[in-house]
Amino acid sequence: MNMLGKLSSKLTEKDAAQLPWRLFREFLITLLIVISFGLIIGFVFWSWIVDQVKDIPGSEFVVQEVESLIWILPLLCLLVVLWMGLWTLRNLVRPLGQFISRAKGLLDFDRDVGEHELSEDEPEEWAEITIAFNQLKKELLANRNSLTEKAIQLEAFVQSLSDAIVIVDLKGHCILVNPAFERLFLLEERNDIAENKTLLKEVVRSPDVIALIETTMKSGEVKREHISVWRKNKEVHLSLTTAPLRHPDGTLFGVLGDFHDVSDIKRAEKNRIELVGNVSHDIRTPLTAIKGYFATLEADIKAGRAEYVERYLQVIEKNVDRILSLTNDLLELSSLESGIQLRREWVSTEEMSLSAVEQVRKKHPSKNHRITVECIEKSVYVDSRRIEQVIMNLVENSLKYIPEDREILVKWDRKPNGWQLVVSDNGPGIEPQHLERIFERFYRVDSARSNQIEGSGLGLAIVKHVMLRHGGEVEVNSVQGKGTQFICHFPSFR
């Protein structure tokens, strides 16, 4: 049933009393005037005919004939009155038809109602209604445009959020999701979740999420909880906040869920704890040795035994150097992470590489490995001190883990998109499970020998950050039994 039919079906006698009786009276008065005017004209016309024919011989016969046809006069009057009534009724009803048509256009927001307004040159009551309706139409269109604009802005805002957003109704159906939510739960191919009002529990396989949203539905209060979900075999830590959605009258109609990824924060917290633990361990070990040898040295001096003094002092010096090395590496890593400015310049790859190798040999005089430098690319635009440190760290790393009869190669090469530094050896290689974490701080491939191998455990982490500061990257390839290859990629500045 259309809107007019619904309105007509609901009219009662009380509603009829509210109709515009002034229009009805005007119409009735018009009809009475027309009828009276027709009767008067008919009477005058009839009297005139009688006066004209009464003196004519045989007029009695004519008068009788005219009297027999006198019924035609009311018929003519009735036709005139009917025509006038229809014309008047058309003028009264036409504004109502326009009003209904425009009202339907306003109710249907998908229909363009246009800019045309109803004519205000109508009877007084219709003119007042038309003026009010035209004003209402302007306000409704303005409100509709404002709501549409706000809806577009809100949708754009929600779509651009990095947090995953979902809104569910009281039955648990998804009525809004953003791209971040689809990415989080791997739903990129299902772009009809909100349109089809899919149940949340069908797309989110996490009892913790469902339970928290249901709790908010029951309590009507904001809830917050840390949860974990698995995505592509990787654990993702989330801070989930659920908030009730209410109508203006306070009734609950849904719940909003905000999934904030805190994996980086959790990872940073874990790294901080591991850093404190590793630094404490690496400092405590040499400090314990220093304290022990110092106590022994003090006892021997008091007892007059001097044969082991030099040996004790060498051990103390070695452990002090170990602490200083750790401290320097931590400071270096901190400066790189804080975004220290690089001092780039064109430097000779051969001079820089030979200088690094020479420093490594002085630091490890007991090592007899053969180290070869090959420079296809003759010069590069880098921070020479930092890259020299990279070469030293990579060469030292090879020295620590390969037998002395093996070789180490330092090679500079030219690539289409930049330069490449390769430090390779033919040692035992690295097991595959270690390759992903080898650039982490304090990570050691052989944890059982960590106390026997010199170094702070930060060398490769420093290499990674130096390369990042240069706009490049470092990767590692290794085959067990054949050797390991560290490849540093530099962007070109030519």
Image: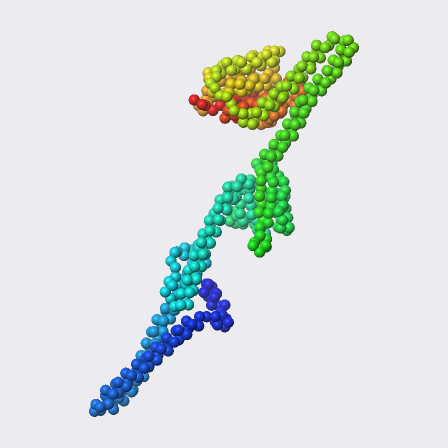
Can you say whether 3 is above or below 195 in the image? below
| x, y percent for residue 430 | 59, 22
The outermost residue toward the left is 57
Q: Is residue 38 left or right of residue 109?
A: left
At horizontal 63% and vertical 21% (from top left) the residue drawn is 326
Image quarter of residue 232: top right
At horizontal 62% and vertical 43% (from top left) the residue drawn is 224
Can you say whether 158 is above or below 411 in the image? below
| x, y percent for residue 382 | 49, 20
Can you say whether 461 is above or below 214 in the image? above
| x, y percent for residue 416 | 44, 23
Q: Give the quadrant of the C terminus.
A: top left
Count up the numbered dots: 0
Residue 73 at least partly seen: no
Image quarter of residue 163: top right
Can you say whether 67 is above or below 147 in the image? below
| x, y percent for residue 451 | 67, 20
**Between residues 483 and 158, which one lies in front from this camera angle?**
158
At horizontal 46% and vertical 54% (from top left) the residue drawn is 143
Residue 381 at least partly seen: yes
How was the colour assigned to the protein in this rendering? Answer: rainbow
The outermost residue toward the right is 303
At horizontal 74% and vertical 8% (from top left) the residue drawn is 306
